[in-house]
Amino acid sequence: MTLAERYQATLADVAGAARDAGRDPASITTIVVTKFHPAALVRELAALGAHDVGENRHQEAAAKAAETADLGLTWHFIGQLQSNKAAAALEYARVIHSVDRASLVDALAKTGISAEVFLQLNLTDDPQRGGVQPEALDQLAERVLASGSLALRGIMAVAPVGEDPAAAFERVRTASGRLLQLAPQATDLSIGMSGDYREAIAAGATHLRIGTAITGNRPPQG
Ligand SMILES: *Cc1c(COP(=O)(O)O)cnc(C)c1O
């Protein structure tokens, strides 16, 4: 299959899954994750109609965003972000999906740049994995709400390998219900990747982060 075929087939499948779940396909943003792929692929995707792209490493993202600045794309940062790269990331990324600790909130807020953020929830017991533990979510949300410049969109999560994604996303919904008591506007859920976007849509995903299903296999990482 060509890139165009994979892109169109994935969008059609996303729309079908939305309708199966009784949802409006237009309520779901599909972010194409272009990590490890060259800027030329981003350009091809834009020509196919993609508006939202995601990257997980700052240097790679910054270079690609600069090379494709003429396309007017919305860049989503979805990987672990060092606090000392926060200001640089906000030069190209409008949305940071991976806010997982107070020091990063402070570094983002200090820039004064308006940005949208998701709090990344760790769905594993392993604190080494990205994301805040569920019991620390409220405190982190309060810090974002106090920032002045950051708009809290909702929760981002990655379903753990080896667990039924539907069960993992159910925990996201529970956390989201709690977050909404504190921040009624933070309704969004950034869940769903190539292997589990149907389950994510059924669980209420508003943002899908889809890489390989659209781009094909990633080139080996450098
Ligand atoms: C790479 C990545 C994705 C996309 O993964 P695929 O399985 O290729 O769709 C989504 N979210 C995050 C955080 C990623 O790092």
Image (cartoon, rainbow, N blue to C red):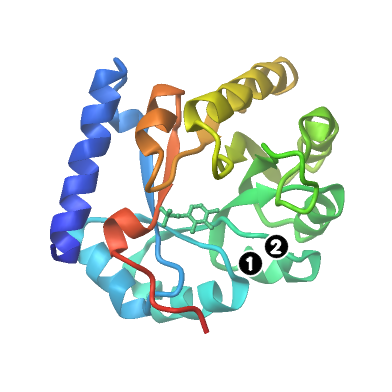
Of callouts 2 and 1, the N-terminal one: 2
The image quadrant that residue 148 belongs to is: top right
Q: Does any portion of residue 185 appear in the rendered image?
A: no
Is residue 103 rendered to the left or right of residue 98? right
What residue is drawn where x is 68% and y is 60%? 80
Q: Nearer the viewer, residue 100 or 161?
A: 161
The residue carrying mark 1 is 89
Q: Position of residue 215 (x, y in %)?
A: 30, 63
Q: Are marks 2 and 1 in contact (CB under 8 Å)?
A: yes
Amino acid type of the residue tagged 2 in the rendering:
Leu
Q: Position of residue 104 (x, y in %)?
A: 79, 55
The label shown at residue 81 is 2
User: With respect to residue 184, does 138 lie above or below?
Assistant: below
The image quadrant that residue 67 belongs to is: bottom left
Is residue 51 rendered to the left or right of residue 162? left
Disc 2/disc 1 C-alpha distance (Å):
8 Å
Q: Position of residue 141 (x, y in %)?
A: 77, 34
**Most distant residue in the bottom direction:** 222
Is residue 220 rendered to the left or right of residue 107? left
Q: Secondary structure at mark 2?
A: loop
User: With respect to residue 131, does 54 lie above or below?
Assistant: below
What residue is drawn where x is 70% and y is 62%? 81
Amino acid type of the residue tagged 1 in the rendering:
Ala
Q: Position of residue 149 (x, y in %)?
A: 72, 46
What residue is drawn where x is 33% and y is 67%? 217
Image quadrant for the N terminus? bottom left
Q: Secondary structure at mark 1?
A: helix
What residue is drawn where x is 44% and y is 79%? 220
